[in-house]
Image: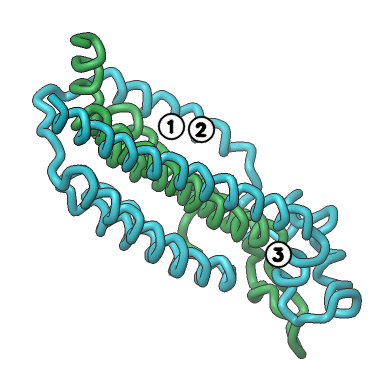
Chain colours: A cyan, B green
Amino acid sequence: MAVTAVALAWLRNLFAVVMLSGIFTLTAAVVYVVMDAVDVAFTEAAVGAGIATVLMLGSLVLTTAEEKVQPRRAFGPLAMVVLTGAVLVYGTLDMPFYGDPSAPAHGHVAPRYIRDSGREVGPPNIVTSVLASYRGYDTLGEVFVIFTAAAGVIVLMGRGRRYRGRERRDAERS
Amino acid sequence: MTFPGLFNYWVVIALMMVGFYVVIAQGNLIKKVVGLNIFQVSVFVFYISISKVKGGSAPILSEGIALYGNPLPHVLILTAIVVGVATMALALALVVRIQDAYGTVEEDEIREREEAS
C-alpha cells in the first residue's frame, strides 16, 4: 500500500505520467490480491492497466505529449486538499478496523451469498454467482453505460473528423 | 498486522487527495483525467479493503475453508472498473475534440482563446 503512495508522489513530474498511472493501477491490482479480491485484480490488471493506458497513449498521440510548465505554485488548491483530507481522516475514526469480521459491511446479504450461492447458482466462485445472478441487473446497467459511452465516443470523434474536413475545404476555397 | 486498524483508510484518503489535487490544481486536461483515474482507484481500494475479513480467503468455494472475504464489494468494484474505463474513454474523446477545436489542452489557453473570440 505504501508503494502505491510513493508511485503517486512521482506522478507530478513529467508526461511519463501515463505510464506511471499504468504502473499505479498494476500496483493497485497487487494490493487487491493481498486483500483476497482475485477477480477484481484480474479485471484491474487487464482493463484498468491495459486498456486505459492504451486509450491514454492514443489520446496523447492525437493531442500533445508535453505539458506546459506551470510557473506559479497554487496554494489555494493545496490548502483545500489538506482540509478535505483532514475532515475525511476525522470521519474514519468511527469506521470499523481493517479485517474486522463483525463490521457492518459483512452483515446483511453477504453471509447468505457465501452460504447458499454454491447450491442456488452453481459456480464455486461466489463473485461470479453474485455478478451474473443475484445482481444481474447491475451488470445489465453496466452494459448500458458502456454502450452509451461508446456511442458518445463515436459521435465526438466522428464529428471531429468531419469538422476538420470542412475546415480544409474552407481553406481551399478561400 | 503491525499497523493500526485504520491505516487502510488513511492510505486511501492520501491517494484520494493526491488525485483531487491533480484534478483541481493542474491545467492540463489529460493530466486531469489521470487525476480522476487515481481518485477512482482510491475508491476501489477503499471498497476492497472493506471486504477483507481477517483470516478469510478469496471468495471461491472449496473444501476445508470456513471463512471467506465479503464477495459483494468485489462485484460492485468489478462493475465500477469497467464503467470507469468507459467513462474515461468518453473524457479522453472530449479532450481530443477540444484539441481539435482550440488547438490546445491547457485550461488557461482555452480560456484565453474563448475570450479572444
Locate the N terminus of chain A and report the quarter of the image it occupies.
bottom left
Q: Secondary structure at mark 3?
A: helix
Measuring from the top left, give residue A23's x and y in whole percent. Answer: 31, 62
Disc 3 sits on a residue from what chain?
B
Q: Are marks 3 and 2 on the same chain?
A: no
Measuring from the top left, give residue B63's x and y in whole percent. Answer: 76, 90
The residue that label 2 is drawn on is: A88
Q: Is residue A82 visible?
A: yes
Q: Secondary structure at mark 2?
A: helix
Q: Is residue A1 visible?
A: no
Measuring from the top left, give residue A72's x and y in whole percent. Answer: 13, 22
Q: Secondary structure at mark 1?
A: helix
Q: Which mark is residue B71?
A: 3
Disc 1 sits on a residue from what chain?
A
Instruction: Identify the residue at the far front of this view.
Output: A173
The residue that label 1 is drawn on is: A85
Q: Identify the residue at image location x=16%, y=24%.
A: A73
Which dot, 1 or 3, sits closer to the camera? Answer: 3
Mark 3 belongs to which amino acid? Pro
Locate the C terminus of chain A and report the quarter of the image it occupies.
top left
Location of residue B61 (image quadrant): bottom right
Image marks 2 and 1: residues in contact by CB distance under 8 Å: yes
Mark 1 belongs to which amino acid? Gly
Q: Is residue B33 left or right of residue A74?
A: right
Are there few (<14), some (14-19), or many (20+) residues within 10 Å of tag 3? many
Image marks 1 and 3: residues in contact by CB distance under 8 Å: no
- A121 or A169, which lies in front? A169
